[in-house]
Image (cartoon, grey):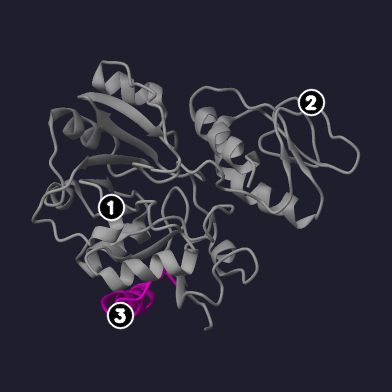
């Protein structure tokens, strides 16, 4: 199969919708990373997502929607969920909410759970595709399962490290501005819980809710949200964290005052670092040497960056 790059214009959107309507999959840009989209109501389309990625079927998917009204047709919202939707949608926040029985979502999307992960993306091309398609799109990151997430169409279409040759098309809208996946919030025992750090800082979520967000114990063998597997986002090379300098033979990815072969942000800007993270991991991996990464502060977007780096460095 040849993976086609589509322009994010009317013609490209029409072609993408044709494939989606036939139960196939198409990679689409979002503000976080590129997602591999398929009709969330079509079990065959959802199975093709898992097949193309080599993703374990116990790992649930995020359903993308054009607005909150469409989201409330699929899941039950309480006032806390509505407050977060008003504050952060469209944007880099996913909420895990009770699934409506009449929602019509394929069971493979939720991995058999009675909850569903929902997001309203802010990227104009993703929104245009959702509006034109007229239905919910399940869309995990458009990369082989466990490997580095894609922040450009070229990452997706790469035949060695991406999904080139496995999927029919990618809507090419350039680089993703946020660069790490969405934050995932769920509710456990009535309390808001951080299921995955991401593009919205947990401090901002707590400010909207007026209460602390708890950090639950995660079972990577039975995830209740995407992005919880122990080994994830991994390059082919080994990865060493919290490095002050490179050891012999290593590629060093610096941050702030720690200079390296590459730098996430020479000025120590966490927003810039998040946007560059996956691209620099790919660049470093292409050098064919072990990778070391400088220490990243555990605050704001740094929590999301460190989560990705810890999982990328985990035993595989």
Q: Position of residue 116 (x, y in %)?
A: 24, 47
Work out which residue is located at the far bottom of the displayed protein and give it: 1
Q: Are marks 3 and 2 in contact (CB under 8 Å)?
A: no
Q: Is residue 281 left or right of residue 172?
A: right
Work out which residue is located at the far left of the displayed protein and give it: 102
Read off the magenta span.
7-26
Residue density around tag 3, few if under 14, some if 14–19, many if 20 or more, within 10 Å: few
Q: Position of residue 250 (x, y in %)?
A: 84, 42
State how far apart marks 3 and 1 are (Cα): 25 Å
Give whichever of discs 3 and 2 has the lower sequence position.
Answer: 3
Label 3 sits on residue: 18
Q: Secondary structure at mark 3?
A: helix
Q: Position of residue 28 (x, y in %)?
A: 41, 63
Q: Secondary structure at mark 1?
A: helix
- Residue 296 in which image quadrant: top right
Q: Is residue 128 left or right of residue 276?
A: left
Q: How many marks?
A: 3
Against 78, is 278 above or below?
below
- The nearer-to-camera label among 3 and 2 is 2
- Residue 115 in which image quadrant: top left
Question: Quick check: can you spot residue 172?
Answer: no
Label 1 sits on residue: 110
Q: Is residue 217 left or right of residue 70?
A: right
Q: Is residue 40 left or right of residue 49?
A: left
């Amino acid at each position: 199969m040849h993976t086609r790059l589509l322009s994010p214009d009317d013609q490209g959107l029409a072609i993408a919708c044709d494939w989606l309507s036939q139960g196939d999959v198409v990679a689409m840009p979002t503000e976080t990373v590129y997602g591999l989209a398929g009709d969330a109501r079509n079990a065959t389309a959802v199975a093709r997502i898992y097949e193309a990625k080599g993703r374990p079927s116990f790992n649930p998917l995020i359903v993308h929607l054009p607005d909150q009204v469409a989201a409330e047709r699929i899941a039950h919202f309480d006032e806390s969920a509505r407050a977060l939707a008003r504050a952060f949608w469209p944007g880099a926040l996913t909420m895990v909410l009770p699934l409506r029985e009449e929602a019509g979502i394929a069971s493979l999307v939720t991995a058999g759970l009675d909850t569903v992960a929902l997001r309203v993306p802010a990227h104009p091309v993703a929104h245009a595709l959702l509006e034109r398609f007229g239905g919910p799109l399940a869309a995990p990151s458009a990369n082989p399962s466990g490997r580095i997430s894609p922040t450009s169409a070229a990452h997706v279409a790469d035949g060695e490290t991406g999904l080139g040759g496995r999927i029919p098309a990618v809507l090419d809208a350039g680089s993703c501005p946020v660069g790490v996946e969405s934050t995932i919030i769920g509710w456990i025992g009535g309390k808001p819980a951080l299921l995955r750090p991401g593009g919205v800082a947990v401090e901002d979520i707590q400010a909207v809710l007026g209460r602390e967000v708890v950090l639950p114990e995660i079972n990577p063998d039975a995830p209740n949200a995407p992005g919880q597997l122990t080994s994830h986002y991994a390059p082919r090379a080994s990865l060493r964290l919290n490095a002050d300098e490179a050891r012999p033979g290593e590629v060093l990815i610096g941050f702030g005052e720690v200079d390296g072969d590459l730098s996430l942000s020479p000025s120590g800007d966490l927003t810039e670092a998040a946007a560059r993270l996956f691209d620099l991991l790919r660049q470093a991996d292409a050098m064919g040497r072990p990778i070391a990464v400088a220490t990243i502060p555990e605050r704001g977007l740094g929590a999301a960056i460190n989560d990705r780096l810890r999982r990328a460095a985990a035993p595989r």
